[in-house]
Amino acid sequence: MGHRLAESSSRYLRQHADNPVDWHPWGEEAFAEARRRDVPVFVSIGYSACHWCHVMAAESFSDEQTAATLNAGFVAIKVDREEHPDVDDAYMAATQALTGQGGWPMSVFTDPTGRVFHAGTYFPPRRRGQVPSFAEVLDAVQAAWTRRRDEVEASAAQIAAALGDQRRRQAQLVTAPAEELGAPHPDHDGVPGPDILAQADDAVAGAIQALLAEEDTVHGGFSPAPKFPPSPLLGLLLEEAARNPESPAGPPAIRVMEAMGRSALHDQIEGGFARYATDRAWALPHFEKMLADNAQLLGHYARLSVHPAASRATRAEAERVGRGVVDWLHRRMLLESGLLASSLDADTVDASGRHQEGGTYLMSDRDLRAAARAAGLGEDDAERLIALNRGVPADESGAAAHIAEDTPRTLHFDAPPVGEERRVWEAVLPVLRRRRAARAQPARDEKAVAAWNAMAVRSLAEAAVCWADDGLLERAGRLGERLWDVHVDDAAGDDAAGDDAAGDDVVDGGGAGPVVRRVSHAGRADAALGTLTDHAQVISACFTLASVGAGAGAGAEDAQRWLDRGRRLLATLRTRFVVEDEEDRPALVESADGGAMLTAALQGPALATPFDGPEPGGVAAAADALQLAEALVATADGDGLPDADALRAVDILHHAPTAAPRAPMVVGASLQVLRRVAVGSPAFRVLSATEEDLAAVRRAAVLHGLVVEPPAAEAVGPGRPLRLSVCLNAVEAMVCLPPETSIAAALARLGEQPVA
């Protein structure tokens, strides 16, 4: 039955090719078939690392009777959410609106135009209390479709209208009239004026106060279980604490990062982080490992490892955690193509084909004792090792009374090992790694996703700067080159523009220029156009590589190549992903080729979300790229200056002050960009320096949210005294503050800028 999926490039779709369900891939063809047969559409959305997706597949999609019901009364579509994030986002909004919650697998029922009329997530094979079985859901939907069609169609129209209205209202938050977010100060040649500075300060302060009120001061974090790493928020908190040592932003960021680093969320043996924890204490993770999460956390732990607000012990532990992520990326996620894979499964499949969640990672006390003996340690050290672990069984979080010698459980520390504990742990770690490697391993989804690889490029480069690691910087540059070579179609021209679903409202139309392809397999990019987030993250990676001096030659020519690449992609972003709303203001679309189905489901284009999830939302990613361009590209040469009416970061950040005190968790990335914009998009300009001084300047830039203008070759060399300025590179400003002979003095100049 699954012949349509058997040759799919998506591993998730191929996993379902043997189902008796007559699956279709996402596309107009499936909806046309539903119209021809006059049946509803069942859209099942998930991803290959998803544990509950595997469960529902085994229970329902592999069942002949269930498949027969689906095949007779529906057109069934299987969607890989990682390949189609726009589809996932649109239908997740519908699912959350209808049920009050979301998750995967997502089970959505639409009419043949793509409009949702019923939705849910995982449905069991038999009723569980108030949760209906999947068969009951299918029967109820089929009955509604055949007996109450008018009600179903009216409901679908209502839901689509509500979703479209929600998207439009969110988009209007992003681009409120410019005067509401402040204007350049009239006496300082474009230096940001008091309104935007005051609003940024107030917004950040309000967000921090709201976070402190929600903080779990016992276990770290800002939410009850389940707990996700607050990755988009951590950049703001660490940057704010670096800028102002007295800021209350530092302690909660440090507390949650310390807690995650010593917890079972962090793989203490192999490195890397799981997606989220199911409990408050971070002791029981959901074991899938995602590139998107680890790419972000690597950069944050690298910053913490050199952060002045952290203790020496915290900095040392942060570097251990960060380097563990780097090692994990290299050993487990690096593909033959030179890119990074998207995820590792939550499950391990045993010889009988049974899925066991977390099976690779759990260790019993007996396992630890045997490893200690194999490492040549005595019984006292073995007991010390066992006492160090405070992990829990995979199915009984916190049920310490049920832990026996042979009970498999997570590896979780109440505190990082120190002293004798550290000696024992370091001695046994090689043995644990060998024994872990001998176990059945979670499968890897080998598709490469442009946005996630771009985030990894950026974090690898910034970690290399923090740790003064030239080898790591070269690896970041190589990954960036592979990302560009595989995922950027430099000759797309007008063909890609023809795919735009935004239609006549696209500002300035399509036009020739490079485009990003979202997904690649085995070094070959798929045809689908990347999202706004894909384009924005690749742009930011290009500008970061230019700022930190990464590349084959690490010289002016190399930096200029990255600047040119980022600038050309920025032109693509401005032309392909910008539409005009009803009031002729710019708005961003996340998908420029979503197709008629998404347009119907949302009653309009797939407008980009202003809110963060586990990674920065499309608006925040775009604002970040635009701000980096303002800070860096415009200074490279006169051609870097955008047109006066070109979209800028300040134009799409109006939602941040409004949302900050109410929902700081979802606007952290936008607030971080707003704070940089508010002080004039600052950059270091190095007039004279040794190589060591330049490395220190770049490290300070990573910590404080600045970029470093590529220095002239003659400015850097042995014995050259340090002289540098902070330049405020807002488009109208281009003001360089007086040169200083130390980094601290130059940063102090930035803090002294008058605003009134």
Image (spheres, helix red, strand yellow):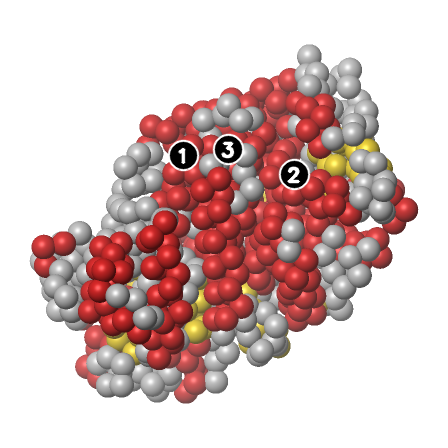
Kind of residue sitting beneath label 1: Pro
3 or 1: tag closer to the N-terminus: 1
Q: Alpha carbon of mark 3 to alpha carbon of mark 1: how far?
A: 11 Å
- Which residue is painted at 80% across and 36% down in the image? 722
Residue under circle 1? 252
Residue 451 makes an appearance in the image:
no
Residue 597 lies left or right of residue 545; in this view the side is left
Q: Earlier in the sequence, mark 1 or mark 2?
A: 1
Q: Which mark is residue 700?
A: 2
Classify 10 Å Cα crowding around label 1: few (below 14), some (14-19), many (20 and above): many
For the residue marked with disc 2, what is the amino acid?
Ala
Q: Earlier in the sequence, mark 2 or mark 3?
A: 3
x%, y% of residue 652? 60, 37
Residue at 70%, 20% (x, y): give it.
753
- Separation of disc 1 and disc 2 at Cα? 22 Å
- In the depicted view, which residue is nearer to us: 568 or 306? 306
Marks 2 and 3 in Cβ contact (< 8 Å): no
Q: Is residue 38 above or below residue 282?
A: below
The residue under label 3 is 309
**Foreground: disc 1 or disc 2:** 2
**As rendered, which of 593 and 620 lies closer to the eye?**
620
